[in-house]
Image (cartoon, rainbow, N blue to C red):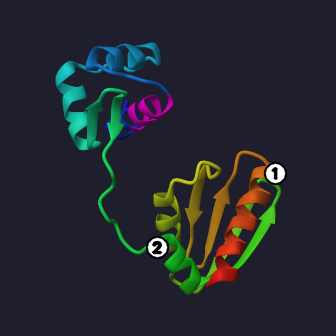
């Protein structure tokens, strides 16, 4: 069990349900077969920039990480295609990675993940209708730009 995987599961848990204490978090992780000590959870909470609120643990607002996706898309995105539940983005050579990182940071709920090459990004949606909606959303960004 890696630290990255454990922290990913912690984020998934706090995004999906109210978890108010480290004990609750430890129990939820244990239910998934992930053992974590209180010291480890404290470190993970700090690393993930989680804050305890009345509604339970929540993520702090992200620090500014770079240019916004809409800015990069307007500058480098050349085409938006779809193949079933996949949306393929064509960018200027050498810019797929930065555009994909910016898209990932947008945390669109309809995007499962992205894979970037040199000038192509594969955007994965859970199903065909969602991929179509993502394609339309991306084309809308291009039309405004």
Q: Does the magenta-highlighted stretch encompass residue 14?
A: yes
Q: Nearer the viewer, residue 81 or 4?
A: 81
Circle nearer the N terminus (1, 2)? 2
Q: Give the residue pinned by disc 1.
A: 128
Q: Quadrant of residue 9?
A: top left
In this rendering, position of residue 26 left or right of residue 18? left
Alpha-carbon distance for marks 1 and 2? 25 Å
Q: Give the residue pinned by disc 2.
A: 98
Residue extending farthest front: 54
* SS assignment for the magenta stretch, majority: helix
Q: Quadrant of residue 1?
A: top left
Q: Residue at x 57, y 71 (%)?
A: 117
In the rendered image, residue 48, in percent from the top left (x then y), is placed at 29, 42
Determine if residue 43 is in view: yes
In the rendered image, residue 23, in percent from the top left (x then y), is placed at 28, 14
Numbered range of the magenta stretch: 8-16
Q: Residue at x 51, y 53 (%)?
A: 107
Q: Quadrant of residue 35?
A: top left
Secondary structure at numbered mark 2: helix
Q: Residue at x 46, y 73 (%)?
A: 98
Could you tell me which quadrant the C terminus lies in?
A: bottom right
Q: Residues within 10 Å of mark 2 (few under 14, many from 20)?
A: some
Q: Nearer the viewer, residue 96 or 42?
A: 42
Q: Residue 106, relative to residue 25: is it above or below?
A: below
In the rendered image, residue 42, in percent from the top left (x then y), is placed at 20, 29
Q: How many marks?
A: 2
């Amino acid at each position: 069990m890696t630290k990255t995987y454990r922290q990913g599961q912690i984020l998934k848990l706090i995004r999906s349900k109210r978890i108010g204490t480290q004990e609750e978090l430890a129990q939820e992780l244990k239910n998934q077969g992930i053992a974590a000590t209180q010291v480890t959870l404290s470190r993970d909470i700090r690393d993930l920039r989680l804050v305890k609120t009345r509604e339970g643990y929540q993520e702090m607002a992200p620090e500014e990480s770079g240019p916004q996706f809409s800015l990069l898309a307007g500058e480098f995105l050349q085409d938006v295609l779809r193949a079933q539940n996949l949306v393929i983005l064509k960018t200027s050579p050498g810019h797929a990675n930065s555009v994909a990182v910016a898209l990932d940071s947008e945390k669109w709920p309809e995007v499962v993940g992205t894979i970037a090459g040199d000038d192509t990004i594969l955007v994965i949606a859970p199903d065909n209708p969602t991929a179509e909606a993502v394609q339309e959303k991306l084309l809308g960004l291009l039309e405004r730009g």
